[in-house]
């Protein structure tokens, strides 16, 4: 004998892994314009919700406009016009699509109070094509060579290196035989690739060397240019280590030659 058994109707939604936070206690008709001042009435919230959180009601996605505490019986969302009605008793759930995206990629909201977007995290931004990072308050693509970074070499009579603070400002040597030397750190995670130096006389020779805090000698020149501010490339990128730095030698030839400063171009490793 063949028998059949009838399976009772099952609420499929209840079988899904939903994250319900409450249920509506008011009705909102299709076409209603919801503003940031419209109270969304509900049973007590089972967890606190924060501005920017995403929820769904009857398949409609909402963005929370203002924080609401646990046990709150209403909350506010960002403005929109309903294209479907919301009935009393409708479940209010965490937007699972958005939850999945944020779990995998974290492209919105905050972490530790810092805002997150598709290409930034607080003060850090990234250029997707080059994968270069920029950090507010940090110069990751260049280092300025300031007057304070220069000293004189042993040529001449050891006169002081002076900063002229008149209308014709800049560093100047005390003896025409002296030359200026700047020592510049290469930031961790970067490589130095080019150097530029500016001066009152734009034809003075500039040479660059790699040195180390644990090494004697300056080795061979990695590249040379002149003091016209035009960047000249190094023979090969100089990656930062725990001990190396750049030595920039500026061959001034007169006490009237003034140097304003320079810049080292960096790439991220």
Image (cartoon, rainbow, N blue to C red):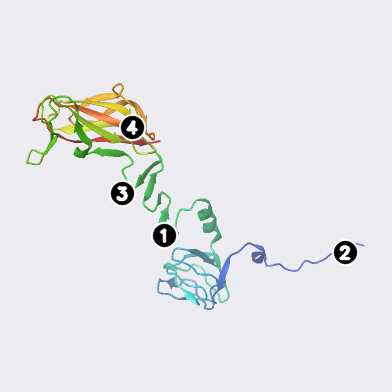
Instruction: In this rendered view, identify the residue nearer to me: 165 or 118.
Output: 165
Q: Secondary structure at mark 2?
A: loop
Q: Which residue is mark 2?
A: 3
Tell me how far mark 3 sits from mark 4, CA to CA.
Answer: 27 Å
Marks 4 and 2, the one that precedes in the sequence: 2
Looking at the rendered structure, the number of numbered marks drawn on it comes to 4
Instruction: In this rendered view, identify the residue nearer to me: 243 or 250.
Output: 243
Instruction: Give the residue displayed 35% in from the left and 30% down from the top.
Output: 214
Q: Which residue is mark 4?
A: 213
Marks 2 and 1, the one that precedes in the sequence: 2
Marks 3 and 4, the one that precedes in the sequence: 3
Instruction: In this rendered view, identify the residue nearer to me: 57 or 218.
Output: 218
Q: Which residue is mark 1?
A: 113
Q: Residues within 10 Å of mark 3 (few under 14, many from 20)?
A: few
Give the quarter of the figure containing the N terminus.
bottom right
Q: Which residue is mark 3?
A: 137
Q: Is residue 159 left or right of residue 19?
A: left
Q: Are marks 4 and 2 in contact (CB under 8 Å)?
A: no
Position above or below: 141 against 120: above
The location of residue 207, given as percent across then percent down, is: 24, 25
Q: Secondary structure at mark 4?
A: loop
Tell me how far mark 1 sits from mark 4, CA to CA.
Answer: 40 Å
Instruction: Give the residue displayed 49% in from the left and 71% down from the top.
Output: 30
Tell me how far mark 2 sits from mark 1, CA to CA.
Answer: 62 Å
Tell me how far mark 4 sits from mark 2, CA to CA.
Answer: 90 Å
Instruction: Give the residue displayed 58% in from the left and 75% down from the top.
Output: 89
Marks 2 and 3, the one that precedes in the sequence: 2
The location of residue 113, given as percent across then percent down, is: 41, 60
Give the quarter of the figure containing the C terminus.
top left
Viewer-side label of 2, 3: 3
The location of residue 54, given as percent across then percent down, is: 49, 63
Q: Residue extending furthest left?
A: 167
């Amino acid at each position: 004998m063949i028998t059949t058994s009838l399976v009772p109707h099952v609420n499929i939604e209840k079988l899904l892994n939903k994250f319900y936070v409450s249920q509506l206690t008011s009705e909102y008709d299709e076409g209603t314009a919801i503003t940031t001042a419209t109270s969304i009435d509900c049973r007590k919230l089972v967890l606190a919700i924060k501005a920017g959180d995403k929820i769904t009601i009857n398949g409609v996605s909402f963005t929370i406009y203002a924080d609401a505490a646990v046990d709150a019986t209403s909350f506010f969302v960002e403005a929109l016009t309903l294209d479907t009605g919301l009935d009393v008793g409708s479940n209010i759930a965490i937007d699972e699509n958005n939850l999945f995206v944020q779990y995998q990629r974290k492209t919105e909201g905050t972490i530790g109070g810092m805002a997150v977007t598709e290409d930034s995290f607080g003060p850090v931004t990234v250029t997707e094509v080059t994968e270069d990072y920029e950090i507010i308050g940090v110069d990751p693509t260049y280092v300025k060579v300031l007057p304070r970074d220069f000293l004189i070499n042993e040529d001449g009579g050891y006169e002081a290196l002076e900063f002229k603070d008149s209308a014709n400002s800049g560093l100047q040597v005390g003896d025409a035989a002296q030359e200026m030397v700047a020592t510049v750190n290469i930031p961790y995670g970067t490589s130095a690739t080019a150097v530029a130096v500016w001066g009152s006389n734009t034809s003075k020779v500039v040479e660059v060397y790699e040195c180390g805090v644990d090494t004697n000698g300056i080795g061979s020149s990695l590249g040379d240019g002149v003091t016209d501010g035009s960047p000249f490339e190094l023979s090969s990128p100089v990656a930062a280590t725990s001990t190396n730095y750049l030595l920039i030698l500026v061959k001034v030839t007169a006490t009237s030659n003034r140097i304003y400063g320079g810049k080292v171009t960096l790439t991220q490793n």
